[in-house]
Amino acid sequence: MQNYSDNSIEARETIKALEARLDRIENYLRIPHELTVEENIPQMEAKTSQSEEDIEMRIGQFWLPKIGVTAFLIGIAFFLTLPLAEINTFIPPFGTYLLAVLIVIISLKLKKSYPELSGYLFGGSAGIAFIATLRMHFFANVTLIQDVTTEFALLALVAVSTLAYGIKIRSIYIICLGILFGYIGALITDSPFVLIPVIIILSILQVILSIRYEWKSILAFGIIFSNFFHLTWTLNNPFIGKPLEIVKTNEGLVVFLLLYSLIFSIGILKRKNNQSEEFADTIVTLLNSVGSYCLFLVLTLMNSSPVFPFYHLFASAMLLGIACTFWIKERSEDMTYVLTMIGYAALSVSIVYQFKAPDNFILLCFQSLLVLSTAIWFRSKFIIMTNFAIFIGTLGAYLMHNYNVDGFAFCFGVVGLLSARLLNWKKGKLEFSTEKIRNGYLFITLILFPYAFYWVLPSMFAGLALLALALLYFGFSKLLHNIKYRYMSVLTLVISAGYLIILGFTNAEAVDKITSFIAAGIVLILISSVYSRIKRAG
């Protein structure tokens, strides 16, 4: 009995020692102790309560001031846009300036205790001052400032002051407000020689700020509004009361859309953390390439310029140059893909506009080979797949345009063979399999050549040409040690034999019947001998 008691005491001490050791391990690894259900429930309730409190604080601290200042600014704006004929013309703008100064003073007083509210109040005061300055030339019965240059200078002063304060306190909201003032001030001059330089300067400023403070959103803001205000001027600037129409004078200024895109591309490329692609980077790239180019395309189409193809050739060269830079500098995947496809889309637009069918289809066909070469350099599976889909689409459009094809159809077959061969040649440098894509190109070639022979050559010569093609495939199989070309050779021989047999039955001439059947027999014997030789070699 005593022995049993001693063993029990030893067991308890051993368990206590193990528990102490486990506690030391948990403390060392910082593993929290398990909580019981009773302990866990209050903690969950505390977290829920804290989360609700955080939401409440966020709404009260950030959103309510934004909404309040915005509502106040809208009210003042509506007041200032009224004619107010019974009030002296000088009173509304100068009274508004006094109000803006008063709000600035209040915002500076609240800067330490309520920094968020202070910033919103300053932004509201800047908006009020800007609208008051606009009223000196617009909205009133009597225009205080007749000269639009003076009006622009005053608006620029408000914009620069807002920008300077925003940069000083590093507030992206106030900076964007100042930039917006700059765009609007340049637009009211209704002169492209003011608007375009202002857009360029502000675009460069936004790129500098985005690089310095890592603000990606300011790039998106700049891309959207730079293109928007350029478009507004192109549509005859309806915001100053002019009729909505396309301005065809100085149509070459549409090229500046590409310059804006280039500036913002530099901002994306020069970002500090450029070793990885974030979702925001891809979105900004989409806006800058797809958005800007689509606007460029629409405006050049509207102008119907005789140099339209050269515009898009230039756009293609610029976009592809940016894509190559992204790949060399960052090994970027998503952004390189976007820029490459838009660049080649611009080249396609140039080709389609400059050349008539079927020449444009043939050039697009050979462009497919160029795209594939670029995709292999970029090691992009997405570009290879997209290019294959576009190649099929181009071939389909060509066949729909001219189903009884001419000799140009052979170009698609040649490009299919070269594309498959290029993918097979460079497959060691790619990090993914292209087997299905290669098979797709070879299958298109296998079907297309017999179809083209049928339409282009006389009946008897078409069968003989197929026989020669089958022998050519067989030669490729031997030379390149690729079994796929042997399969193509045999299938082409079968197609040739079938064609010759059908031709023998349907041809009215006795000589042609005899020739067709003899040729078909020779073809079938050739197929049999090929397989017999393969079996002996195996």
Image (tube, rainbow, N blue to C red):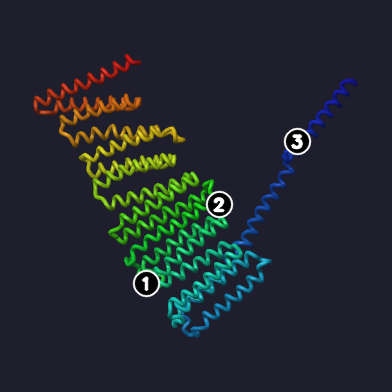
Per the image, the residue denoted by label 2 is 272
Q: Amino acid at mark 3?
A: Ile
Q: Residue furthest right?
A: 2
Q: Amino acid at mark 2?
A: Lys
* Residue at the spot 60% in from the left edge and 73% down from the top edge: 103
The first of marks 1 and 2 along the sequence is: 1
Comparing marks 2 and 3, which lies closer to the viewer?
Answer: 2
| Helix, strand or loop at mark 1 | loop
Point out residue 294 in the picture as x, y percentages from the top left corner.
Answer: 38, 55
Q: In which quadrant of the rendered image does the C terminus lie?
A: top left
Q: Nearer the viewer, residue 276 or 509?
A: 276
Q: Would residue 494 appear left or right of 441 to someone viewing this image?
A: left
Per the image, the residue denoted by label 1 is 242
| Helix, strand or loop at mark 3 | helix
The first of marks 2 and 3 along the sequence is: 3
Q: In which quadrant of the rendered image does the N terminus lie?
A: top right
